[in-house]
Image (cartoon, rainbow, N blue to C red):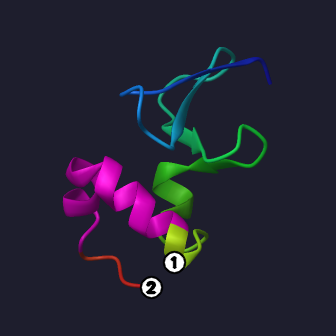
């Protein structure tokens, strides 16, 4: 997988991932090592702390997935 990492805002913790081999996936990482798939992994595979960070930095997605509970 050939990926480019970028941040939406310079002060964000989360890195978004452009996977140059795949289209239509929303991928993100906290450390550029472990990559999460937004639709498959949120919030189930995030730690409590990761979810808190994600929700703070991405209120749109937190609202979008508000019916998912951990």
Q: Helix, strand or loop at disc 1? A: helix
Q: Is residue 33 left or right of residue 38?
A: right
Residue occupied by mark 2? 70
* Spot occupied by residue 5 in the image (x, y as percentages of width and height): 61, 23
* Spot occupied by residue 54 in the image (x, y as percentages of width and height): 41, 56
* Spot occupied by residue 7 in the image (x, y as percentages of width and height): 47, 27
> Residue 48 bears which disc, if any?
1
Q: Quadrant of the C terminus?
A: bottom left
Write down the region rendered in magenta. Answer: 50-66
**Which residue is pictured at 53% across the width and 64% down the height?**
50
Q: Is residue 39 left or right of residue 47?
A: left
Q: Is residue 17 left or right of residue 42?
A: right
Looking at the image, which is closer to me, 23 or 13?
Answer: 13
Vertical relation: 47 (above or below) 63: below
Is residue 64 inside the magenta stretch?
Answer: yes
Mark 1–mark 2 CB contact (< 8 Å): yes
Q: How far apart are labels 1 and 2 at the CA level?
A: 9 Å
Vertical relation: 12 (above or below) 4: below
* Spot occupied by residue 51 in the image (x, y as percentages of width and height): 46, 67
């Amino acid at each position: 997988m050939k990926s480019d990492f970028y941040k939406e805002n310079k002060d964000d913790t989360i890195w978004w991932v452009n996977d140059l081999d795949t289209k239509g996936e929303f991928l993100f990482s906290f450390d550029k090592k472990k990559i999460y798939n937004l639709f498959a992994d949120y919030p189930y595979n995030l730690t409590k702390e990761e979810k808190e960070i994600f929700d703070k930095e991405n209120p749109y997605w937190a609202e979008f997935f508000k019916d998912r509970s951990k």
